[in-house]
Image: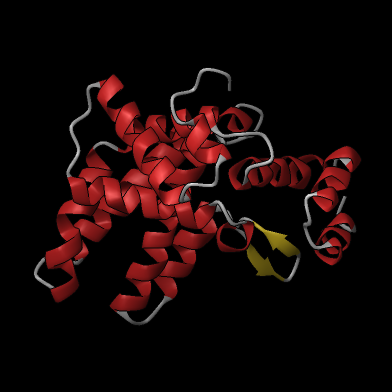
């Protein structure tokens, strides 16, 4: 990452949120994409939260994994209360945006490609914009979800710029290594994760599936 304009900030431990804010702002400016301050703040918060594996992945009956978007959608439809349904749909949109941006390269080797994540995420945010219109929470988030839906692919591209700029051994880089290990069961990836302090019990539990 030599020559990256914000590498020194990351190396010296300046707040991760500030680093993501600068990087996303730069990416959107380079792409010529206009975005509301509130929408950019939402994306920064999303990226800051999901750089921790325990917030992106879920504990399921099969272990610690990322739930497929189609299952999230089906579960959301079964929820009885609108607020619960909206929360599940919001997570669907958030996960789709994060994966479409940060893990877009790995999607090329999967049955569903990045276009699927873009479509699912855009539709999820569009649904939220309509469903929350006229509500108290909607007054604050409706415009954000509308912009996320309409410019989903542009925002995913901005996250890809963040992905390219991360320092080796950063939390986001570790998360990408974890994703590689989940997909392939790589022993070298598992060994590196243990060296980085990832819970060995979690790795052993999921390894039984590979």
The answer to whether residue 165 is visible is yes
User: Residue 81 appears at what percent x and percent y?
Assistant: 33, 81
User: Residue 164 appears at what percent x and percent y?
Assistant: 53, 27
Front in this rendered view, residue 3 or 36: 3
Toward which corner of the image does residue 67 lie, by quadrant?
Answer: bottom right
Q: Is residue 67 above or below residue 152?
A: below
Looking at the rendered structure, the number of numbered marks drawn on it comes to 0
Front in this rendered view, residue 210 or 160: 160
Give the left or right position of residue 52, taking residue 124 as reference. Answer: right
The answer to whether residue 113 is visible is no
- Point out the image quarter for the N terminus: top right
Residue drawn at x 52%, y 30% is 7
Residue drawn at x 43%, y 74% is 78
User: Residue 21 appears at what percent x and percent y?
Assistant: 35, 42
Colour scheme shown: secondary structure
Front in this rendered view, residue 45 or 79: 45
Q: Is residue 158 above or below residue 190?
A: above
User: Residue 64 appears at what percent x and percent y?
Assistant: 71, 62
Residue farthest left in this picture = 134
Toward which corner of the image does residue 40 lie, by quadrant?
Answer: top left
Residue drawn at x 41%, y 42% is 20
Residue farthest bottom in this picture = 80
Residue drawn at x 45%, y 31% is 6
Give the left or right position of residue 202, taking residue 131 as reference. Answer: right
Q: Is residue 142 above or below residue 25?
A: below
Residue farthest front in this picture = 12
């Amino acid at each position: 990452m030599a020559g990256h304009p914000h590498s020194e900030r990351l190396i010296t431990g300046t707040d991760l949120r500030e680093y993501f804010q600068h990087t996303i702002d730069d990416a959107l400016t380079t792409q010529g994409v206009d975005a509301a301050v509130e929408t950019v703040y939402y994306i920064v918060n999303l990226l800051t939260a999901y750089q921790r594996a325990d917030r992106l992945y879920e504990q399921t009956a099969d272990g610690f994994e990322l739930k497929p978007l189609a299952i999230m959608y089906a579960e959301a439809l079964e929820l009885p209360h609108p607020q619960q349904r909206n929360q599940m749909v919001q997570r669907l949109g958030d996960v789709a945006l994060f994966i479409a941006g940060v893990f877009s390269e790995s999607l090329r080797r999967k049955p569903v490609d990045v276009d699927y994540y873009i479509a699912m995420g855009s539709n999820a945010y569009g649904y939220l914009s309509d469903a929350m219109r006229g509500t108290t929470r909607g007054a604050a988030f409706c415009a954000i979800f509308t912009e996320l839906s309409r410019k989903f692919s542009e925002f995913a591209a901005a996250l890809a710029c963040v992905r390219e700029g991360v320092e080796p051994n950063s939390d986001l880089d570790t998360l990408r290594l974890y994703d590689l290990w989940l997909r392939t069961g790589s022993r070298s990836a598992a060994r590196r994760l243990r060296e980085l302090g990832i819970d060995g019990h979690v790795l052993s539990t999921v390894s039984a599936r590979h």
